Structures are given as structure tokens and as C-alpha cells.
Amino acid sequence: MIGGYRATLSCGLGALLVGYYEGSELLFAGQVRAGLVPHVRRRLLEKLQVLCVSGCPFAKLPGSGLNQRDDITADQMGDMQWTKPQLVAQIRFTQWTANNRLDHAAFLRLRVDKAATQVRREP
């Protein structure tokens, strides 16, 4: 589930900020950069810009836990654009880290067959 993106000057979309639901809480799962080739970035950015909101949709701000490479620091928060959690992304990854983050994640496609509220952590 996409809850935002990191904006960049060069291409507009630097990374997707993804998560999953645990009960009614949306939990941060990491940033996804791989698989975002230029034409995919443009298409995704068009869809995400209309969903922008002012506040972070994740229950806990990303980076408020242990220091992980995909956590978001206070300095990076200004680059983040939060979105309504409505788009579901299919993400390939190797494993879950000890911090419940996706390891080696890559964007594959958007899914239209699944509602965002149905996105749960897969083992």
C-alpha cells in the first residue's frame, strides 16, 4: 500500500513509501526505489499527486524506531509527500528485516484487484 513518496527535483519521484495494515493501523514497511524506471515514475507521480494530503498516514512516523537504512530521518521529512492510502503496489522483496522493513524491495506494478485496507504483512 502506498502512503506517500519522496519527492526529488530531478525526476519528481525518488521513492515510494509503502506500508501494510495491522488491524486498523497503517504501519510503515520501507522505501521502494528499484523498479521505478522513468516512464513508471511519471505515471505513478500523476496518480499520487491527486491523492496528496498534509499529514502522514502511517500510525508511527517512519524512522521513529531503530535506525535502519530505509527509515526516514527528521532532515528528510521535508522531501516527503504524503498520500491517501488508496493505491496498492505489488512489491517484490527478499525478506522482512528484524525491524519489519522490506529488504531489497522492488516495484512491480499497481494492483487494482485489491483494496488498500486489505493489504496485510505477508510472511
Image (cartoon, rainbow, N blue to C red):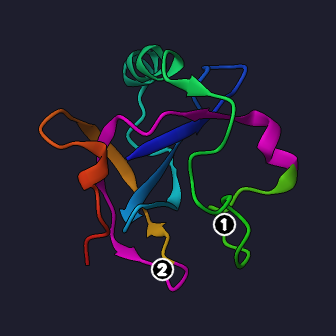
Q: Quadrant of residue 12?
A: top right
Q: Quadrant of residue 34?
A: top left
> Tag 1: residue type?
Arg
Residue 53 visible in the current orientation: yes
Horizontally, residue 92 falls left or right of residue 31, namely: left
Residue beneath the point at 45% across and 24% down? 41
Does residue 114 lie above or below 47 as drawn?
below
In magenta, the rendered stretch is 75-99
Q: Residues within 10 Å of mark 2 (few under 14, many from 20)?
A: few
Residue denoted by label 2:
97
Does residue 110 lie above or below 67 as drawn?
above
Q: Is residue 105 magenta?
A: no
Does residue 61 lie above or below 122 as drawn?
above
Residue furthest to the left in view is: 113
Seen from the viewer's position, the closer of residues 36 and 110 is 110
Residue denoted by label 1:
69
Q: What kind of element bears circle 2?
A: loop
